[in-house]
Image: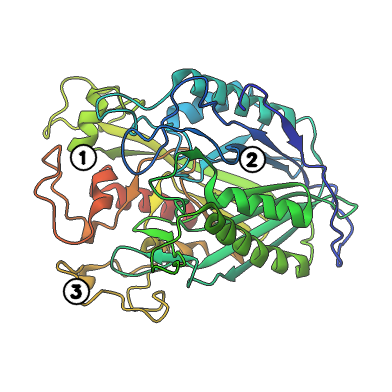
Amino acid sequence: MLEAMKTTLALGIGFFLSSLLPCSAELSAAASAVDITPDPAAGPVWIAGFGLGRRATGVHDPIMSRALLVSDGKTTVGLVALDLVGLMRPHVERIRKEAGGAVDFLVVASTHNHEGPDTMGLWGESPFVSGIDAAYVERLVGAVSAQVETLAQHLRPVTLRAVQLQAPTADYVADSRDPLVIDDTLSALQLAAADGRAVATVVNWANHPETLWSRNTLLSADYPGALCRRLEERFGGTGVFFSGALGGMMTPDHRKDEKGEEMHTFEEAERIGRGIADLAADALAKAPAEPAPALSFRSKDVLIACTNRRFHLAMGLKLLARGTFTKSGDAFGGKISPKNVPYVKTEVGLIALGPVSLALVPGELFPELAVGGYDGSKSFGRPVVKKDNPNPPDLSKAPKGPYLRDLMASRVEMIVGLANDEIGYIVPEYDFQANLKSATMEPQPEGDHYEETNSLGKKAASKVMGALEGLLRD
C-alpha cells in the first residue's frame, strides 16, 4: 500500500550478459520501483477508464512507480513510468519542483492503465463529481519526488544495450477504429552494471492497458505490470514500461474462450505482458554494448486550443484540475464559450541516449501519425477500412508524411505516450468528425469516432506534431 512506500532499488539477482564490454565511466544509472497502490479499505477508490462509478473492491497486483535515472556525467535525466490512466501537467510540475533539482530533466509518464485509480477526475461516482482522491494524489506526488531524489544518490557506472524489432500483432494487439494501422515497433534498452547485473530494462510498445475491461473491480497494473515483473525475473533490476502510440484505437487482441467470448482475465494480461517482455528480453540478451553513449534532451511548451465542449463542462465543474490560458499564454479569463475558448499548455520533448531517441508525446497519439500505414503496409493482412463501415475515413485526405518515425530516424526509437501530461487522444484532423459545438457531442457521426470526445480539438494533432517536427529538424 502507498503508506508503506517500500522501495526496491535495482540491485536484484544478476543476469550475465555474454558480450559485455568494459563499462564506460561516463554513463551511470539507478532505478527503483515504488508501490503507490491506494487502499480501497480506507475509502472509495474509483477505477479510471470505461464508465463511471467503478469502485475498487480490492487489490490484485500493485500499482507502481518505476523510475530510472541516467547520467553521462554532464547531463542527468529521470524517466518515471506510473501505472496510472494519466497525470496532468500541473501534477507533473509539482513532482519536478519537489524533486529539488535532482535531475536536469524529468519525464513523468503514465501507462494509461484502465484498472488503476482515477488521477484525472473523469471517472467518479457521478458525472458531476471528480473521481480524484486529493489526499492520494498528495501522497503520490511526495512519493515520486522522493523516489527521484533518492535515486540521484545511487548512480553507478553502467553499460547500455538497445534493440528494436517488430512485435507480432495477432493475439496481442488489435485496431478498433478504421483505418486499421498498427505501430508494431517494440523497442527496448538495458543499463547493466560492470558485473553484468541489470540496473534497469526499459520496454516501449503501443497497446491500451485495458485487458481486464470494464467489469473488473480489483486494482491492477494490467499487462504492463506482468511485463515488468517478467523483465525482472529474466534480468533482475527494475523493469520499466512506456506506452507508445496507442490512440485510434490500439486495444488487446484477446483470445476467445470455448463460447467464443473474449477473455478479459488476469491470465490474459499475464500472457500479453510476459509474451512482449520475452520478445524484448531475448533480443537484448544478444545485443552488444554501446560505447560511451552521450545523453541530451530538449523540450518545448505548446499552447493548444480546447474546443471540446465536453471538456469545457468538465473544466467548469472543476473535474479537470489544470490551468487554462489565452492564445497568447496569459491566464484565461471570462466565461468559456465557443467564441472564448481556453487554451491548454502542454509540452513535447526529445531525449537522445546514444543510438536511442525518445519522442515525448503528451497524450494518446494515433499510430498513423507515427508510421503512416494508410497504404495497408501496417494492417498485417487485414482490410485498412472495413467493408461494412457506414462512415469510412477519406484516405485521400490523410496526411502524406513524413511521419514521426520518419523524422526520428534513429536505430532505436521510442515514442513515449502520456509523457508529462495527458491531453487525450491526438486525432488526425482529416478524420475528426465529432460535433464540438455540443457538450454531449450530439449528433455523433456514424462509425467509430469515440476518440474525438476525449480530445482537445481538431488542431491538437497539428500542434503536437508540428512542435515535435520542429525539435527534430532543429
Is 168 left, or right, of 163 in this rendering? left
Q: CA distance from mark 1 to mark 2?
A: 33 Å
First in sequence: mark 2 vs mark 3: 2
Write down the residue under mark 3.
Answer: 388
Amino acid identity at mark 2: Arg
- Which numbered dot is residue 66? 2
Q: Nearer the viewer, residue 211 or 41?
A: 41
Q: Is residue 67 above or below residue 134?
A: below
**Residue drawn at (12%, 35%) of the image:** 338
Q: Nearer the viewer, mark 2 or mark 3?
A: 3
Q: CA distance from mark 1 to mark 3?
A: 29 Å
x, y percentage for residue 233? 75, 53
x, y percentage for residue 355? 66, 61
Write down the residue under mark 1.
Answer: 308
Is 405 left, or right, of 98 in this rendering? left
Q: Nearer the viewer, residue 241 or 52?
A: 52
Is 205 left, or right, of 402 in this rendering? right
Tell me if residue 117 can be seen: yes
First in sequence: mark 1 vs mark 2: 2
**Residue drawn at (24%, 49%) of the image:** 452
First in sequence: mark 1 vs mark 3: 1
Q: Nearer the viewer, mark 1 or mark 3?
A: 3
